[in-house]
Image (cartoon, grey):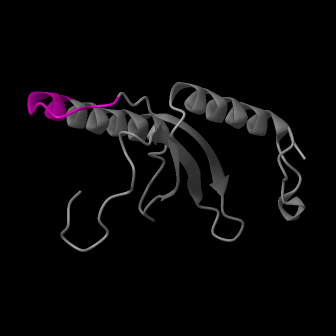
Amino acid sequence: MLNDIYLDQRHAPFNTTYLQRMLGVIDNAIAQHPRTMAVRVDLRLPDDNCNRNSGLISRFIESLNAKIDARYRNKIKHGIRIYPCQLRYAWVREVGEINEKSHYHMVLFVNKDTFNGLGSYGEGERD
């Protein structure tokens, strides 16, 4: 248990520093947006990725923030009601035991009043 949260012991040992920081991110997200949506994302790199990992998460978050900002400005331009949305996130890099490739586990926290779903999944659909 960590702060009354059950932790699956099959995945022990746990890095309590990481867990405490993640709980802080969650608490801040909910304090700002009581209707917070969390989305888990796994980022895997192509095989030909030769040490281009430096700053990868920063670039990913900057790109995502730019898309959120563009959407926000577009809605304002068209007179559509908007809700503020500050993106919050937590991530960890993991290296595969067998292939020794880096991949990232990430959770994104957004205002559910702004984004209430993940969009369309069909081929060629945009949302």
Against 83, is 126 above or below?
below
Residue at left 18%, top 70%?
A: 124
Q: Position of residue 9 (x, y in %)?
A: 89, 60
| Quarter of the figure with residue 85 | top left
119 horizontally vs 88: left or right? left
Range of residues picked out in magenta: 73-83
On the question of residue 54 being in view, the answer is no
Depth check, front residue: 90 or 1? 1
**Residue 8, position in %: x, y?**
84, 60
Q: In this view, does 111 lie to the left or right of 81?
A: right
- Residue 110 visible here: yes
67 w.r.t. 11: above or below = above
Task: Estimate the x, y position of residue 31 in percent, counting from the top left.
Answer: 59, 26
Residue at x 22% of width, y 37% of height: 71
Residue 27 lies left or right of residue 118; in this view the side is right
Q: In which quarter of the image is residue 62?
A: top left
- Identify the residue at image location x=18%, y=29%: 73
User: Is 64 left, or right, of 10 in this rendering?
Assistant: left
